[in-house]
Amino acid sequence: MSVSRFVLGCALALSTAFAVAATPGVSDREIVLGSIQDLSGPAAMLGSPVRDGMLLRLEEANAAGGVHGRKLRMVVEDTGYDPKRAVLATRKLLDRDQAFAFLANFGTPVVMATMPLIVDAGRPHLFPFSPHEATYSPLHPLKFQIFAPYQSYMDAATRHMVQSRGYKRTCLLYQDDDYGLEVLKGVEGGLTRIGQSLVEKTSYKRGATDFSSQIARLRGADCDFVVLATVVRETIAAMTEARKTGWMVDMLVTASGYSAQTHELGGAAVDGLYGVSVLPHPYAEGANSALADWITRYRKRFGVDPNVWSAMGYSIADLFVQGANAAGRELTVEGFVSALEQLKTTRDFFGSPEYRFSHDDHLGNRYGRLAQIRDGRWVILSDYLK
């Protein structure tokens, strides 16, 4: 080899090594991902299966050789659904772990506190469990979302319920934070479009367990339909309190309460509850062959049945794998974003919606479906509502 060729070869090798090293979380052997979840707080029953679903997909990708020869390593931090803890966890994942991207960060209060830190550091903020408008709008090169916004799907779901069932006195119980306020806007918007307005609304503090005063207030307002901006535990508590007092009013919960844990833990008290589904629950009974195989793999890996949160975690990790594969071997943030903006999926064995991104639109789906708990099981009642 000539001296000039040797020098050129060394220069190219150094240039490639520098390019890899210059991308946080990307080495010659691995890609580091970060996720902040509630594993010990009021939403831990949701955060844990999200984590496990992601881990299963990443482990499967690694077993198949990784992404262009790189193994995927996820570092998960527990926030306990506390924004202050989440900020510390985010800084740790950015500075110490050098996460290339953040996946499925959990909870609107947490996301609103941490998302600015992540995008300011130049890292992709992908598919958070917070259908808040700020997670995709205004358009930002590093923000991507697949979950229909609270405002959009609660506008549509509220209108559908009121128009199809003839309710005249709609009320709202909501969590006193960004999550609850986004739902409030959606419900009010939907009612306004059909010439109605909220009769009563009442809030609760995150982590509350006693809903006696809120239910009494709503019942006193003679509500014939109650929308719940709650998560699983609070959904059960609110419905149990209502049924205990003999109040059999119809209730509709956001996708944050659409979970098998709701009927498994709530029992008869939650039968009849309506909910918004972004993805059907993965019940083993009646599952297609691909879904049945996935359920078996999940059970073998974690020793429990999966739920809809497990499926959503798996889907999120799969979207990352697809995007990283499409970005090519020389993985950079810019290349990954470009690949994701061209990604288009079809409905899969979970029954997911079709996800579509573009250079001008980073919201992959805008719609939810109506479901109801009947005899201890969620039943899908509609296609995606618009």
Image: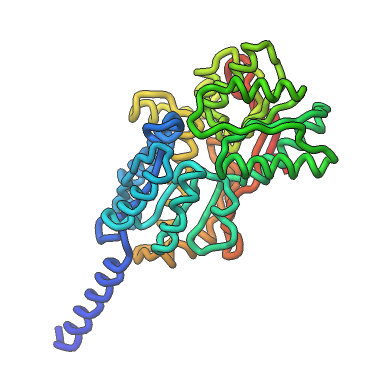
x, y (%) of residue 199? 77, 32
Residue most extreme to the right: 195
x, y (%) of residue 209? 50, 24
Question: Where is residue 243, by image quadrant?
Answer: top right
Residue depicted at x 71% and y 36%: 157
> What colour scheme does the image use?
rainbow
Residue depicted at x 17% and y 82%: 6
Q: Nearer the viewer, residue 248 or 69?
A: 248
Q: Nearer the viewer, residue 79 or 305?
A: 79
Q: How many marks?
A: 0
Q: Nearer the viewer, residue 37 or 12?
A: 37
Question: Where is residue 161, by image quadrant?
Answer: top right
Residue depicted at x 43% and y 67%: 334
| Image vertical order of residue 381 relative to residue 269, above or below | below
| Image vertical order of residue 102 relative to residue 196, above or below | below
Query: In the rendered image, is residue 319 in sight?
Result: yes
Relative to 81, 145 lies left or right: right
Query: In the rendered image, is residue 283 in sight?
Result: no
Q: Nearer the viewer, residue 30 or 126?
A: 126
* Quadrant in which the C terminus is drawn: top right
Residue depicted at x 50% and y 34%: 206
x, y (%) of residue 8? 22, 83
Relative to 154, 175 lies left or right: left
x, y (%) of residue 65? 30, 49
* Quadrant in which the N terminus is drawn: bottom left
